[in-house]
Amino acid sequence: MTTCRLVLVSAFVALVAPVSAQAPIQTKGVTEKLLATVDLGPEIEGMAGRQLRMRLITIEPGGATAIHSHKDRPGTVYILQGKITDHRDDVATERRLRIRYFAA
């Protein structure tokens, strides 16, 4: 199984679920590196205390991020290597290398 590496840009902390038949309930085998942040308060009215973050997230084979919501926490994911399964509304969708999608 291949390690999954992705770049995540989000207004808050946001992770995605790796390959799995069922939505995982526990996070394991996940590391992240903060690449950049932008303080949104001075940039956009009403965004005080919020940041735009870019992170490199590595999900090892067999790793997972617990199922969670992105309500009020939108993000964009770019898969650099491997594949993940995105779980939304009880539907699992496989996402592969170099696929961009929005986590909303």
Image: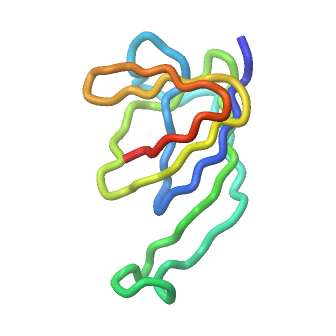
The one nearer the camera, 12 or 89, is 89
Residue positioned most to the left: 89
Q: Position of residue 40 (x, y in %)?
A: 49, 78
Q: Position of residue 2 (x, y in %)?
A: 73, 17
Q: Residue at x 50, y 20 (%)?
A: 94
Q: Position of residue 24 (x, y in %)?
A: 43, 22
Residue 83 located left or right of residue 20: right
Name the quarter where the N terminus is drawn: top right
Q: Residue at x 50, y 36 (%)?
A: 16
Specify the color scheme.
rainbow
Rendered view: 7 above or below 27: below
Q: Residue at x 56, y 44 (%)?
A: 77
Residue 70 located left or right of residue 2: left
Residue 28 located left or right of residue 66: right
Rendered view: 52 above or below 27: below
Residue positioned most to the front: 99
Q: Position of residue 47 (x, y in %)?
A: 39, 79
Q: Residue at x 68, y 17 (%)?
A: 61
